[in-house]
Every structure is written in structure tokens, then in C-alpha cells.
Amino acid sequence: MLGASGLATAGLAVYQWLELLVVRNGGKVACAVNETVNCAAVWNSKFSSFVHDWLGMPVAALGVVWGVAALLLTVLLWRKGSTDEWPLFAASVKFWAVAGLLSIIAFGGASLEARAVCLTCLGTYGLVLVYAFAAFMMLPGPRWPQPQYLLGGMAWVFVVFAPTFLVTLIPAGSTPKAGTVTRFSGTTEAQLIDNLLNLPKREAMLTAAARKKFLSSPAKDVSDLKVRVRAGPADAPIKVVEFSDVLCPHCADFEESLEELRGAAPPGTLSIEPRLFPLVDDGCVTPGQKDSPKDIRCVGAKAQICSEDHPLYWDVRKAIFANQQALRSSDTVLDIVSKVTNRSKDSLLSCINSIDTQAKLANDITYAKRYDIEGTPLVILNGRTTWPSSGFILGMAVSRGDVNAEWFKRLPEPPPAEEGHEGHGH
């Protein structure tokens, strides 16, 4: 049971690692069902990011390390089964089981902080519990390591763990961190074109899917809905309109991509117009229960509208999405916006509750519904819907709107439409 649980843990961790790579490249994974059952939200949590920064490998890679080390310690224990050294290696197995139990507490707490459940992580926790049960309840001899074997048991844990960690660190070092996207920026347009011609496979697939959706999407008349805020020139050949919800994790990811695109696109080629679409049933017409998801979504949307005339508007959006996992109440939203804009909460609330702000939000909702919005982020490029693909948006900016540019012709066959999306926050 010890060896089987260790091997199974390593195998499941490899699967999680591969899925993490899909997430880091903008893809959608099966375990990201919704905002609550969402492995990607846990993998992108602040705690997981801290672990990745500190140790140089993602949590999934640590799962591989733990599983392989658990298997190796079990093999050593089995080989010493009829010798006097058996209690020493039994102690090392138990110490490793304790390390696994502590990791469950740490990573389980991170899931609670992220307000999300990772189904594959629960599977890992179950396998670790099986290993711990076998180590403490099924091995013959004393349940707890005897004092004379404490130091030796810890030493053998280090002997097995250290090389396993170092070997795993080699592939783990190239795993993108949370929030990172393909780096398109270059000092010249030629470098941008070279990047577009050599997109990573996953990014190329997403770009192809976005292009396909753009070509098949009809333009809508929204001339009656005036622009309130825009980054970039009004006459830019590529105009992106993006609808977001403050609790949508994919919106937070796309916000980082948009910030990069603003700096990467050739000057004057791209404009970005942010709009709001809180994922509630009534468009925030009626108040939500205090600190409910509806309340947070509505206050978050209206607080952004109330900051549109502020010179630090884009910093407001960035701060809200950067602190998305901490948005547990509408007061948290107000604290963030108040701090960035140096505006009192009372003044913000007065604006949030005003008829004018509700009317502006209603305009955004009307705009989005003309495109049959199903979730966020909704991305509209030059009047047509597309997927939130950095590669496609930048490719269109560099080509000045030529959807048949050379880099687009080199793209692979796009996946079915439902698979090309980075994910909706509905």
C-alpha cells in the first residue's frame, strides 16, 4: 500500500503538471468547471505562486517529488525488512508521511483562501492519507519512531529527497509562473513578426481558434453606445472592446495580457476599451445581499465606472484583478479603489449608488447582449467577437487588420469552436 500510494501520487502529480502547462499557455482544463470547482484558481493562488517563486517549481512538481520520494523510501524499507536497520527506515517513511500531512494542511488552506476546490488536489490528499495510514497503522513495531532512530530517519529522508528535488527542478525551472503569458514584446516590429511566426504550439492553436471565430462572427451596430474610456488612439486600426467581471478568474488573466499588449503592439495600432458585465441575473438593478458574490460583482463594476474619469483608472482595474482572490466583501473593493484613487469611501458609495452609474452599467450590459454574451471575458475586435487570444490580437495589430497576414497563414488547423476558448467566467 505504501509503494502503490507513492507511485499513484507521483502519477497524478505528473497529470496535474501537464494540465498546469495548458493553463499557463491560456488553455482550458477539465477540472476548471466553474468559479468554485476550479483547479486553475488554486494553482494560480497567491500561496501557490509563493511556493513556485520560493522553490523554483510549481506545486504539481512538488507532488512528483513527494510521490517519487515516498516510493523510494518504501523500496528501501522493503529491502531492509529482515535486518536490524528496518526500524531506521520505518522511521524515515513515517517522517515523510508527516511531511505529506503537513502539506495537506498548507495547500488545503490555500484552497480555502482562493475560495476554490481543486478536484485533482483532493485526489492527491487522499493518496497521501493512505500513505500516512499505512505508515502509522500497518507497519509492524512501535507506532511512533523510537528516539534512537529519529536523527537517522530524518537523514535518510534528506538523502532521498534532495536528489529527487534537484532532478525534478531541471524540467520544473521552465514551467511558466502564474500570470505569465507568451512574451511578444520586442524592440522592433521585425522581432514581433518573428515571435508571431514562431508561436508555441498551444498559443498557435488558440490564435487559430480566435481567428476562426472572428471570421465567422457578424459585426453589430453599437454606434448608439458611446465610448467612455479608451487606451490608445481612437483611429487605431485594431479596436478591442473587452467585457469583464471582477470575480471572473479568466478576466484577471486576460487583464494581464491586455497590459502586455498595450506595450507590445506597434505605436498607434491598438486601442482597448474596457466595459463591464457583472455576472448577475438582473444587471445590478436590485441590491445584492451584503457581501454576497452579487454584491461584490456589482460594487466592483460600478466602482470602476466611478473611476473612469480618474487619471489612475487603469491602476484601479489592475489592483482589483491583482487582488481578486481577496475580494470577499464589497468593502474590500472599496478599500482597493479608495487607496488607488485617494478618494473617500463615502464619495465612492455616493457615485456607486447614483442613477448615472446604473445607466452607464446598463449601457454596457445592452452592448454585451447584442453579441449574445454567454460569459466573461467577452472580447470584440473591430466589431466582431473573438476569443481572448494575445496572439491573434497582436497579430492583427502588427498586420494593421490583415487577417490573412503571413503569420496567420502558418497557423495550425484550429480546434472545434468550443475548445478554442480560454474559458468563461460564467
Image: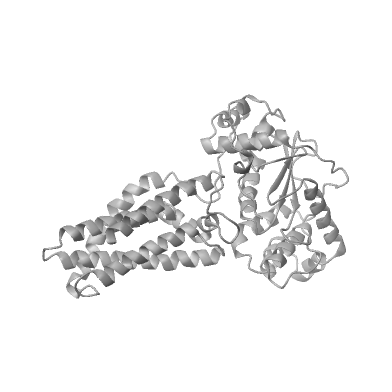
Residue 342 seen by the camera: no
Quarter-wise, where is residue 206 in the image? Answer: top right
Query: Quick one: 337 or 367, which is closer to the camera?
Result: 367
Q: Name the residue rendered at 85%, 41% in the picture.
A: 221
Left or right side of 131 for 351: right
Quarter-wise, where is residue 349 in the image? Answer: bottom right
Q: Residue 356 at what x, y percent from top left?
A: 86, 60
Q: Residue 53 at what x, y percent from top left?
A: 46, 54
Left or right side of 358 for 25: left
Q: Name the residue rendered at 68%, 58% in the picture.
A: 246
Q: Which residue of the protein is positioned furthest toward the left in this rendering?
A: 83
**210 vs 160: above or below:** above
Q: Which residue of the protein is positioned furthest toward the right in this rendering?
A: 224
Left or right side of 153 for 274: right
Q: Residue 387 at what x, y percent from top left?
A: 66, 42
Query: Quick one: 28 or 264, which is closer to the camera?
Result: 28
Query: Quick one: 416 or 379, which is closer to the camera?
Result: 416
Quarter the C terminus occupies:
bottom right
**406 vs 327: above or below:** above
Q: Name the residue rendered at 61%, 49% in the picture.
A: 423
Residue 290 seen by the camera: yes
What is the number of callouts on the image?
0
Quarter-wise, where is residue 77 in the image? Answer: bottom left
Q: Name the residue rendered at 56%, 32% in the picture.
A: 195
**329 vs 205: above or below:** below
Q: Residue 310 at what x, y percent from top left?
A: 77, 56
Quarter the N terminus occupies:
bottom left
